Image (tube, rainbow, N blue to C red):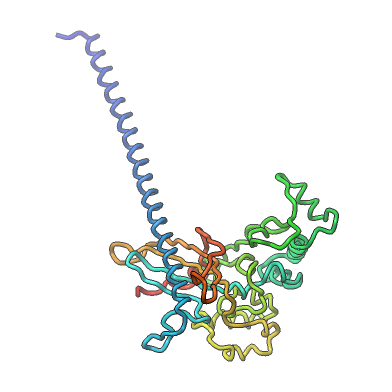
Amino acid sequence: MWTKGEGGVRGGALLAVLWLTAALSAIAFAVASTVRAETERSANALDGLRAYYLAAGAIERAILYMDWGPGQASPDGTPRYWVPWRSTLYFSFPAGEAVVEIIPESSKLNLNTATAEQLYALLLALGAEPERAREITEAIVDWRSPAPGGMTPFDQYYLSLRPSFRARHASFEEVEEVLLVKGMTPELFYGDYGTDAQGRLYPRGGFRDCVTVYGAGARVDVNTAPGALLASLGLSPGAVEWILEQRLRAPFRDMRQLEPLSGERGFERLGIGGGSIFTVRATARLRLPGGGLSDLRRSVAAIIKRLPPGWDRSYHVLRWYENAWGHSASLQPWPPAM
């Protein structure tokens, strides 16, 4: 026979057990959720690493295609490997697929030799306000010009920043140096997103896609030049739109295809291919167990210099980008499985 006091003790013990069980259950659910999140994060990181090596392998294969050149043709008569007018290559691997863009550096505007007028026109074409475009242009010219013997207004501005620094007053060695000049913004340098008539987002290239420190910039490759760079040459908006539409259907193979634009201002600056320094940019997607392609994309890029015969290798890597932005690959529909 138990007393009222004993029943209270037993009831309190049962309540304590129930609370302890609830607490342990909450801890178990929290741990399970954390483990699941970490597992998914690890899986995504692994897929990202696999896509990185897939893109890096696609760059290596694209360079081989460039070495083999136009010597062999496919049964339909098209080049089997690479020709100067071919700016995009599609590769299919057991682990996934990749799109490779081959962009001549010589077709871009050279930061160290471009005139102030050319830089100003490019910045306006990229959407910069006239006052900001003028300030950035003057800052770029000041940065690459020898020191006048005293501090320039731009030097005084850079020294007032925290942390402070000095302008190099020498040629640009990397395009990314432009991020330091007065007036330049990340949005203008890297580009941003716009919306089309249907409200869909699309990437808009930035200043870095139009300039280089390697090429001469005498002629612009009509198959790879961004629309803003074409507009900065003096081409009318209609001419720029025509070029973008035509090369989306098929690349220009001969300058005679550009005869409808022969009366346009800046036409003499247009060309096809050119130079020995290229940006090779690959965007890869993994293949899923069901045969489809993953939504995860990883882009890798390299700036290479093709070497003449007689060297121990056919190319030299000038710059490697582990995280790149494949503009054309993101604008164009992904090719069907090959």
Q: Which of 106 and 159 is in front in this view?
A: 106
The reply, left or right, for residue 40 in relation to residue 70 is left
| Quadrant of the rendered image containing residue 90 | bottom left
Q: Nearer the viewer, residue 60 or 310?
A: 310
The residue positioned 67% from the left and 85% from the top of the image is: 267
Q: Position of residue 41 (x, y in %)?
A: 39, 48
Residue 316 sits above or below residue 46 on the image: below
Pick the quarter of the image with the C terminus. bottom left
Q: Residue furthest left?
A: 1
Q: Position of residue 42 (x, y in %)?
A: 38, 48
Q: Which of 76 and 245 is in front in this view?
A: 76
Residue 108 sits above or below residue 33 on the image: below
Q: Where is residue 302 in the image (x, y as percent from the top left)?
A: 52, 65
Residue 27 sits above or below residue 338 on the image: above
The residue positioned 75% from the left and 65% from the top of the image is: 137
Pick the quarter of the image with the N terminus. top left
The reply, left or right, for residue 128 in relation to residue 60 is right
